[in-house]
Image (cartoon, rainbow, N blue to C red):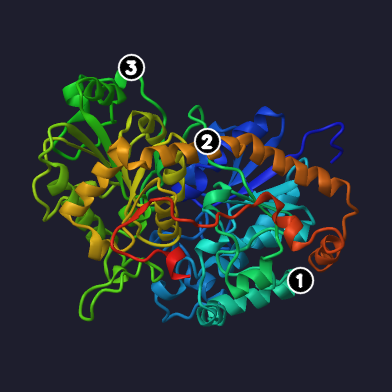
Amino acid sequence: MNSATSKPHVVFMNMAATGHMNPTLPVVSELTARGCKVTYFVEDTMRAVVEAAGATWRSFRYPESDFTGILRNPSDFARLTAAELLAAGVPEDAKLSEYGFPFSLVYNAQLVLPKLLEDLRSLDPPPAVIVYEPFLACARVAAHVLAVPCVSLYTMPGPGVFVAAEKMIVNVESRPWVKQPQQWIIREYGFDLFEQGALMEFYSPFQNLVTTIDTLYAPPASKHQLERFGHFPFKCVGALVDTHVKRIENAGDGTGAPSLSLGETSAQQQSLTESLQAGEFSTAQLSLDGIRHARSSGKRVVLISLGTVATGRMWNETLPAWSNDDDRDAGTRRMWEYTGKEFCQFVYQQCFEAFGSDPNLLVVVAMGSNGQEALEDLPPVPPNFVLRPAVPQLELLPLLDGFITHGGANSTHEALALGIPLVIVPVFGDQIYIADKVAHCGAGVSFRYPLRTLSVASIRSALDATLQAETGHRDAAQQLAGQLASAGGIAAAVDSILEVVRSHEDTDKPSPRTFGEALPNLLAPSVGRNQVRRNIKPSNGADTGGIIVEGQSQHDAK
């Protein structure tokens, strides 16, 4: 491509998960606004939002299955044929808990790569750069084979949120459905995914955009991270949010259509009583005018959301093995022994009892598609609670006084960008790191060990603390909002992507087969570890008055 005469063709690759999709959509919109052509490979359930953002939608294709995305939900794996699984190294007697997501990511690459490369080579003009979710091994291999640069867009606070024990790394990488496809990819394409990556950590040697700020960034920390990709560049660009771009409210569990945020229309504006329908679970669209009316009458508005994984994909499954371990006494259940349903019910019950008797609060709960089932065996819904499967979160956030959240990266950064302090009840993964980090910054309260620390009294006390100005939580959140505003956001992300394209055009391209081997030599003379990290200034982690409820934070444990 000659940049003097044409704009680059940017290819996106992603999985159909709410938190991983939403930050990419404003980037797509901005790229198309600048004249770039954008093609987006993702499951067909995401087609509407992808096309609304301005991209051309394309599916991932499998040898025999008609599935169109990246394997993630149990229903996705059910669509694979036995022959496809066997060819990828999955024995017939294997359990889904053993070979399902995320252990599927390498053989998922084997299954889609032949047709993916065929589709990429057919694009006109050819791709100038691949922007991808770093969980996707197939994107990293495709960029290598085509000899095009790639940029990962990481929707968590950084690689350091996943610090696995070395024994666990060895165990996972030795499983037949991981090892066999890894070796197949080496034979077919000359690329070893684990030389410079790991499961769920297929970062780019060119650029990795992280949707956070320096204060909250988690750099590579473990031995394998530092050895394999510790020298890669990571750049914080802040929250990627545009209220004018349609997005996903809830991607669901793969068994039904996702819930999309399309905004309110006059036809959907019912009377205030009908639209809010407090005291019961309703699938009616939440009326923002009803929320505004509640605020104008003196009520404080609080949102409770436990995300889309525990309320959806993991609803009837036990929570991931890397869930929040709260050191409970022997004989008591741990987090990974709870299903998503059981954990959500536990949190909802505490909140019903803590806030249901307060006439000055209006509590909105985003419960996911299983909301009605979640009410089983719970006390009656309080009259001041408004329950919905999903809510238009970006539009609702400016109307909130408080937010009780699971600490998902998107929810956290979107709220902090508006200076809203948080009460965080983390479940697994990066949510634990985020909860502790926000508390150390003073911008909220962390329930580090929710099964041991969350109660009616403690959740009421935590929310009160974030609502009261004298505690300083709102001031701390406002400081983080300023940092997020300065990070550059969508414009910075797009600038970085296009800079990678320009830099690649100015460099002689090695052949596709030797590109991976040549890259370290190309980078070594001019880019050292400190230079690569010049965009990042990790926080010193100093405690500025945040609250961690009865638990030791990850920072304190180091």
Q: Position of residue 473 (x, y in %)?
A: 36, 42
Q: Is residue 412 left or right of residue 494?
A: left
The residue positioned 22% from the left and 51% from the top of the image is: 459
Whether residue 155 is visible here, answered yes or no, is no
Residue type, mark 1 in image: Gly
Crowdedness near tag 1: few (<14), some (14–19) or many (≥20) residues, C-alpha within 10 Å: some
**Which quadrant would the N terminus be assigned to in this image?**
top right
Mark 2 or 3: the one toward you: 2
Q: Secondary structure at mark 2?
A: helix
Q: Is residue 227 above or below residue 131?
A: below
Mark number displayed over residue 482: 2
Crowdedness near tag 3: few (<14), some (14–19) or many (≥20) residues, C-alpha within 10 Å: few
| Camera-nearest residue between 334 and 136 | 334
The residue positioned 29% from the left and 58% from the top of the image is: 549
- Location of mark 1 (residue): 190
- Location of mark 3 (residue): 266
Q: Quadrant of residue 264?
A: top left
Q: CA distance from mark 2 to mark 1?
A: 45 Å
Mark 3 or mark 1, earlier in chain: 1
| Camera-nearest residue between 398 and 442 | 442
Mark 2 or 1: the one toward you: 2
Q: Is residue 171 above or below residue 126?
A: below
